Image (spheres, helix red, strand yellow):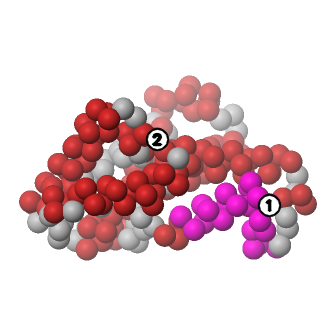
Amino acid sequence: IHAADHPGVPNAQLVKEKTRIAVYYKNQSIAEQNSVDLCWDLLMDPRFKTLRDTIYGNDVERRRFRQLVVNSVMATDIVDKELKALRNARWDRAFHGAPSGIGGHSEEQEDHETANTRKATIVIEHLIQASDVAHTMQHWHIYRKWNERFFMECYKGYQDGRAENDPSLNWYKGELGFFDFYIIPLA
């Protein structure tokens, strides 16, 4: 669901254009929040009651499921440095016992179920990030196919006056940087 109703330009452009959804989401993870809201509303449709009953059985489980959905989709906003720092801190706390900064409790001082839930949640967030860029880790032909489509989306944004820079001028350099600073560390 992470790209449902994607506008075809980055969040920064939506902020610059002062779009309705940028204002609504206070210029934070705009496309991602919009996708969550649209898809959550669809899931709440009466036609999907059986599906909802299968996913969660009570209000506590519903809230937990919603939080997982929100966290997972927000994890695909790789540009937001604050969200990235929060994810990294949660990873460190889940797997290295680093203090959360909230109350100073270590993982040893909390119950096993809470620690396992934290680990599962942060792993799910990283899995959706990997899924979002999976084309970069697959066969060369798959990578080229999806990279070309992304390039064309970016180039159309440029041609339509919705991007300042012509992506054709630095595409390859940008891809190398993307691999060095995002794909390889994520993998």
Reading the chain from its start, which is encountered first: label 1 or label 2?
1
Residue flagged by tag 1: what amino acid is it? Gly
Bounds of the magenta segment:
84-103
> Quick check: is 89 in the magenta stretch?
yes
Residue flagged by tag 2: what amino acid is it? Ser
Residue that carries the numbered disc 2 in the rendered image: 131
Q: Is residue 136 above or below residue 79?
A: above
Residue under the image location 49 percent in, 30 percent down: 48
Q: Position of residue 185 (x, y in %)?
A: 52, 55
51 to the left or right of 144? right
Q: Position of residue 60 (x, y in %)?
A: 71, 46
184 to the left or right of 56? left
**What label does residue 97 carry, if any?**
1
Residue under the image location 90 percent in, 60 percent down: 109
Q: Badge 2: few (under 14), some or many (20 or more) residues near its Cα, within 10 Å? A: few
Residue under the image location 36 percent in, 46 percent down: 3
Residue under the image location 77 percent in, 65 percent down: 98
Which element is circle 2 on? Answer: helix
Q: Position of residue 62 (x, y in %)?
A: 64, 43
Q: Quadrant of residue 18?
A: bottom left
